[in-house]
Amino acid sequence: MNLINTPVNAPTDLLNAAALESATAIATLAGIGKHDIAIVLGSGWVPAAEMIGAPAAEFDMTEVPHFSAPGVLGHSGKIRSVDINGKRVLVFLGRTHFYEGKGVDAVTHLVRTAAAAGCETMILTNGCGGLNPEWSPGTPVLIKDHINFTGNSPLHGAHFVDLTDLYSSRLRAMCHEVEPTLPEGVYVQFPGPMFETPAEITMVRNMGGTLVGMSTALEAIVARSLGMEILGISLVTNLAAGMSGEPLNHEEVLQAGKDAAVRMGDLLAKIIAKI
Ligand code: HPA
């Protein structure tokens, strides 16, 4: 087996030694030297994994050096290698969140590893709150842009990365071929783990955000810095704080994911087959 990974377009100084070690371990565990597409299944998306396809290999994140098990209920902590129409897809069932306090490098390690494993496309999914009252829980929304409201940068040193068209308009157009009515939104990443206050949701609305969550933006920035093409899809699991008159809770987030699993998995499988 060829274990020499071929990071595509990746400035090698951004692919740290840890990412290369993780990618080498994944190549061994998956029995294949290069993957093409990486996908992160966020809160609520894990039940969709079955629909993406039968895994050629599956292993625990903890078997890969520099990875730790996700600290959140609803994230399984597995990595799968799936063959879809001859494309090898690396599926991460869970992620490290910024609020776990392990630092931005731990949050983005998965992305650097995917690039080191050869992936040219990064699909980031999440569960989030929606600000558009028409988006009932279970609605998938394409991310067209983001606001990084974590107060942190995941890049180190003088890397001046262009974030115009960060969420690829080419990939969004492909998604619209699969599902023409998919809405688009602007995702605002908060640090978490607390949900937002109603006043913060008013602020988000005023600054142009339509989706709120606790992931994705930091990862997308690193993926772009590594030359990957990025697709972001949010699953609206609840109306944002203060909009429904109900308190928010994590179980509701997971339940919305379970209810939408078949639709989400089917959508992902069709999109991946097109890439
Ligand atoms: N806010 C932040 N993160 C979330 C939400 C929310 O309303 N729902 C799911 N993840």
Image (cartoon, rainbow, N blue to C red):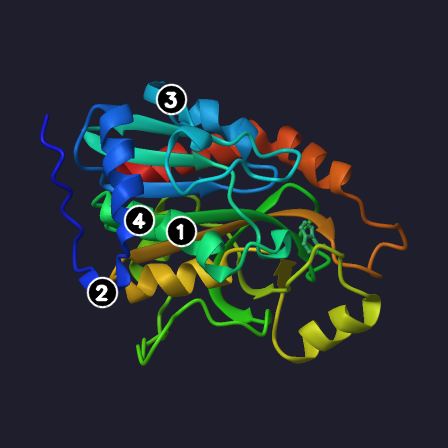
Please provide percent x and percent y for residue 253: 70, 41
Foreground mark, 1 or 3?
1
The quadrant the C terminus occupies is: top left
Instruction: Look at mark 4 in the image and give the residue it sits on.
Output: 19
Please provide percent x and percent y for residue 149: 60, 71
Mark 2 surroundings: few (<14), some (14-19) or many (≥20) residues within 10 A = few
Instruction: Look at mark 2 in the image and give the residue it sits on.
Output: 13
Please provide percent x and percent y for residue 80: 37, 27
Residue type at mark 4 is: Ala
Q: Is residue 258 above or below residue 22?
A: above
Q: Report how far apart the C-alphas of labels 4 and 3 lie in the structure.
A: 19 Å
Decide which of 176, 44 is in the foreground and name it.
Answer: 44
66 displayed left or right of 11: right
**Secondary structure under the numbered disc 4 in the rendered image:** helix
Foreground mark, 4 or 3?
4
Mark 3 surroundings: few (<14), some (14-19) or many (≥20) residues within 10 A = some
**Secondary structure under the numbered disc 1 in the rendered image:** helix
Q: Report how far apart the C-alphas of labels 2 and 1 lie in the structure.
A: 14 Å
Dot 3 or dot 2: first in sequence order is 2
Tell me, yes or no, whether the two marked residues, 1 and 4, touch with CB atoms within 8 Å. Answer: yes
Dot 1 or dot 4: first in sequence order is 4
Instruction: Look at mark 3 in the image and give the residue it sits on.
Output: 58
Mark 4 surroundings: few (<14), some (14-19) or many (≥20) residues within 10 A = many
Tell me, yes or no, whether the two marked residues, 1 and 3, touch with CB atoms within 8 Å. Answer: no
Residue type at mark 1 is: His
Label drawn at residue 275: none
Residue type at mark 2 is: Asp
Residue type at mark 3 is: Glu
Dot 1 or dot 3: first in sequence order is 3
Tell me, yes or no, whether the two marked residues, 2 and 4, touch with CB atoms within 8 Å. Answer: no
